[in-house]
Image (cartoon, grey):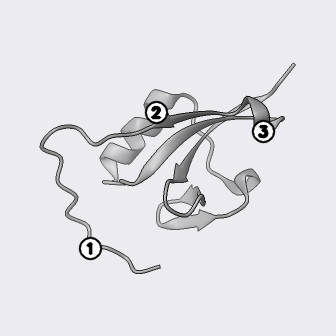
Amino acid sequence: MQRMRIVLQETGTGRYLKELDAWSADSSEAKDFVSSTTAFDYCMAHHITGVQVVLKFDEEKYDIVLPMLPPRGFRDDRPSQAA
């Protein structure tokens, strides 16, 4: 049986969210969410944009990527961070 994790991934860098404002290239370090809805809500609550939800399985070929689009009228008031 395949184990599934629900994580957030930056679309531009491929890094995974570890905690608020902390990212990792290693998906095993990523913050787990109990559902995709919880992941979406987390992004909205913390004004996180430029990410996608990934349903991550033991075998990467089974991973499912769910692109996220901000709702209409959403404004990101956080200052941009240079990488």
- Per the model, the C-alpha gap separating discs 1 and 3 is 33 Å
Element under label 2?
Answer: helix
In the rendered image, residue 71, in percent from the top left (x then y), is placed at: 22, 38
- State the residue lying farthest toward the left: 73
Tell me which residue sits at (45%, 50%) in the image. Answer: 51
- Residue on which disc 1 sits: 79
The circle on residue 10 is none
Tell me which residue sits at (47%, 61%) in the image. Answer: 20
Specify which label sits upstream in the sequence, 2 or 3: 2
- Per the model, the C-alpha gap separating discs 2 and 3 is 22 Å
- Residue on which disc 3 sits: 60
The three-letter amino acid code for the residue at tag 1 is Pro
Labels 2 & 3 near each other (Cβ < 8 A): no
In front: 81, or 41?
81
Specify which label sits upstream in the sequence, 1 or 2: 2
- Per the model, the C-alpha gap separating discs 1 and 2 is 24 Å
Tell me which residue sits at (54%, 67%) in the image. Answer: 22
The three-letter amino acid code for the residue at tag 2 is Thr
Instruction: State the image quarter where residue 19 is shown.
Output: bottom right
Q: Closer to the camera: disc 1 or disc 3?
A: 3
In the rendered image, residue 4, in percent from the top left (x then y), is placed at: 72, 29
Q: 1 left or right of 51?
A: right
Q: Residues within 10 Å of mark 3 (few under 14, many from 20)?
A: few
Q: Closer to the camera: disc 2 or disc 3?
A: 3
Labels 1 & 2 near each other (Cβ < 8 A): no
The circle on residue 38 is 2
Q: Residues within 10 Å of mark 2 (few under 14, many from 20)?
A: few
In front: 58, or 33?
58
Tell me which residue sits at (12%, 43%) in the image. Answer: 73
Q: Residues within 10 Å of mark 1 (few under 14, many from 20)?
A: few
Instruction: State the image quarter where residue 32 is shown.
Output: top right
In the rendered image, residue 1, in percent from the top left (x then y), is placed at: 87, 19
